[in-house]
Amino acid sequence: MKLKASLLFSIVALSSCSQPENRESASIKPVLAEITTPHQAGANLPYLTTDKNGDLLHSWVKKTGDTTILKFATFSNDQWSTPVEIAHGNDWFVNWADYPMIAATQGGRLAHFLAKSASGTYSYDVNLITQKESDWSNSFIPHKDGTPTEHGFVNILPLSDSTFQVAWLDGRNTGGDSHDNHGQGGGAMTLRTAEIGLDGTINEEVELDNRTCDCCQTGGAMTSEGPVFVYRDRSELEIRDIYITRKVDGEWITPSPIAQDNWNIAGCPVNGPRADAIDDVLGVTWFTAANGQPQVKIVFSIDAGATFGEPIIVDRGLPLGRVDLVMLDKQSAMISWLTQEGEESLIKTQKVYVNGVTEAPIVISKTSGSRGSGFPQMAKSGNEVFFAWTSLSGDSTEIKMAKVVL
């Protein structure tokens, strides 16, 4: 499918930022263009990433009757490949915030979905599935606790030509409580990881944190020093700030906060961080509402996550969060998020430099602030940044896509 004609969108002024220095690019301003999509109406839960060749990978789900189908396609040379089914089932846990993912190495691909393990609402397992050539494998579960509890919010990092570092939230200690009741009569949610091979091997499964927020997405990146994961922690005093854990010299080190928001909130905000890295430069973006002030922030590290600079406040108006981030180069990143302006919910994107300079944000699209609109996704391929989001029309869904040419 070929690209549609470019549709120029206006660039809007930045509402506010902790670093007031704002500039217009000296080069041609980024142009936003709609692109055709490889799916039909009814598609939902988009995810975007790129492979080692820089080609765009796009996965999504569609429900037909009682069956949920996970599909993917690649975008190369301005054209979509024919969509391919990864897996399907009638016992899946399908949730607006806990969406399937796909990742690729030189040797193959790895995807995941969530399937029910018992009748409880939040009793489900992470199911992984690999592709080395044309066929996808049978699914397998990376965690071996066997408890009818919640396992999800996966993050997948390509590790080598044949392995991936996979992290997930693991509720084996919760006793099967619902999202709202984790820790009441049961233990806390945990963060775990394992190294997964394309042949289905599971190695070095470890617990990274024994008390995390219950239902916020995890983020991750491969730095020059190794894999890192970022996530929303949960203290005994219900402080839910963003933490990082890194693998250094073959060992996962004790998690530490990337910033001190001190957001005290009794329940899970369902708003996790996202991260990306180029060599030793790591960017992390997240949502917070500490002291009743909703904000979207980004922070950079130039030593692979060992230390961080001061957070940059991108939006302190009425952001809803649902953030994403891609590093453009070692000096800058592009982030996306949802925000509320008057009666409108908007998907915005903005270029932010490591030195704190910000460019004017671009409105990607109007959207809905409801859960059904999900979490917009972004990925960089060549000199283009791609976006995908769920558009709602009554009870029906449609995935729309656009790209920014840098």
Image (cartoon, rainbow, N blue to C red):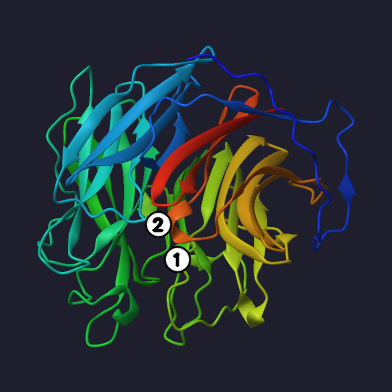
Q: Report the number of numbered marks.
A: 2
Instruction: Compare residues 9 and 167 and report the one nearer the observer.
Output: 9
Q: Where is residue 310 in the image (x, y as percent from the top left)?
A: 72, 62
* Labels 2 and 1: the sequence-earlier one: 2
Mark 1 lies on a secondary structure that is loop
Return the mark for residue 301.
Answer: none
Residue 67, image x, y percentages:
18, 43
The quarter of the picture where residue 342 lies is: bottom right
Image side of residue 272 versus residue 96, left or right: right
For label 2, count other residues whose C-alpha is less than 10 Å away and answer few (under 14), some (14-19) or many (20+).
many
State the residue in front, 115 or 343: 343
Q: Is residue 201 visible?
A: no
Give the residue drawn at x 81%, y 59%. Answer: 15
> Marks 2 and 1: CB-CB under 8 Å?
yes
- Per the rendering, the mark at residue 270 is 1
**Circle 1 Cα neighbour tier, 10 Å, few/some/many (<14 / 14–19 / ≥20):** some
Q: Which residue sits at x=19%, y=51%?
A: 92
- Mark 2 falls on what kind of element? loop
Q: In this view, does 207 lie above or below 325?
A: below
Q: Which residue occupies the extreme front position in the image?
A: 394
Q: Mark 2 highlights which residue?
A: 97
Residue 57, percent from left and from top: 42, 28
Amino acid carrying mark 2 in the image? Ala
* Quadrant location, the C terminus: top right
- Say which quarter of the image contains residue 322: bottom right
